[in-house]
Amino acid sequence: MIIMIAAVAENNALGKNNELVWHLPNDFKRFKALTTNHYIIMGRKTFESFPKPLPNRTHVIITRQKDYNPEGCIVVDSIEKAIAVCPENEDSYVIGGGEIYNLALPYADIIEITKVHHTFEADAFFPKISKSEWLLVEAETNIKDEKHLYDYTYETYIRK
Ligand SMILES: NC(=O)c1ccc[n+]([C@@H]2O[C@H](COP(=O)([O-])OP(=O)(O)OC[C@H]3O[C@@H](n4cnc5c(N)ncnc54)[C@H](OP(=O)(O)O)[C@@H]3O)[C@@H](O)[C@H]2O)c1
């Protein structure tokens, strides 16, 4: 299955200047637990937002650049090719950013959103999720604490 995973603010903000605009350690842990040992599909900008590739995951990077070839990564020039290189009958994760979530939405089976209950200035945004196409099947809210400045809810959507 193709699963999109994202942390999304109330105004659909994802990040600014190629960085996240919040720090939620529990969300990082959940992201790691879900994506480890899987293929992860991402845009070139999201890949470059990491200090180094994420361990124990196969990186599939989407770019229009012909000569882009970071070591140990699969590079493709479309979302269709990205999905095609992922193993069938396994979960593969689309991890962003805004441009790639838009391209991947028609192909996604599940969306895992961490809704961050705040609005942020941003230059990358998650696409609008149509309630007529997507069903919310799980929601677990976590209240802010000394390590998490905002309340946040883990939401799981499946395609209707
Ligand atoms: N909150 C979250 O969960 C989350 C998750 C991921 C990222 N982010 C944030 O999102 C931001 C990055 O998102 P973004 O939208 O700016 O960039 P992005 O989606 O990560 O990457 C965009 C790049 O993908 C390539 N691309 C896009 N459409 C393409 C197409 N049709 N065919 C081939 N290649 C294509 C292009 O690469 P080239 O320019 O190389 O051709 C383009 O510049 C950052 O702020 C990051 O921190 C947030």
Image (tube, rainbow, N blue to C red):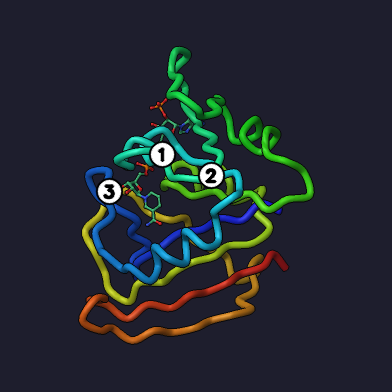
Residue 123's tag is 3
**Figure quarter occupied by ligand 1:** top left
* Identity of the residue furthest to the top in this view: 67
Residue type, mark 1 in image: Pro
Residue 146 in the image, given as x and y percentages of width and height: 21, 81
C-alpha distance separating marks 1 and 2: 8 Å
2 or 23, which is in the foreground? 23
For label 2, count other residues whose C-alpha is less than 10 Å away and answer few (under 14), some (14-19) or many (20+).
some
Residue contact at pointers 3 and 1, CB within 8 angstroms: no
Disc 3 residue lies near ligand 1 with CB under 8 A: yes
Q: Is residue 91 positioned above or below 87 on the image?
A: below
Label 1 packing within 10 angstroms: few (<14), some (14-19), many (20+): some
The residue at 49%/83% (across/down) is 140
Q: Residue placed at 54% from the left, 65% from the top?
A: 112
Which is more foreground, mark 3 or mark 1? Answer: 1
Q: Quickly name the residue at label 2.
A: 57
- Residue occupied by mark 1: 53
Quadrant location of the C terminus in the rendered image: bottom right
24 is higher (above) or lower (below) than 94: below
Residue type at mark 3? Asp
- What element does badge 3 sit on? loop
Where does the image place residue 16, in percent across and percent down from the top left?
24, 50
Which mark is on residue 12? none
Q: Is residue 87 left or right of residue 92?
A: right
Asked if marks 1 and 2 touch (Cβ < 8 Å), the reply is yes
Helix, strand or loop at mark 1: loop
Residue 8 % position (x, y): 39, 64
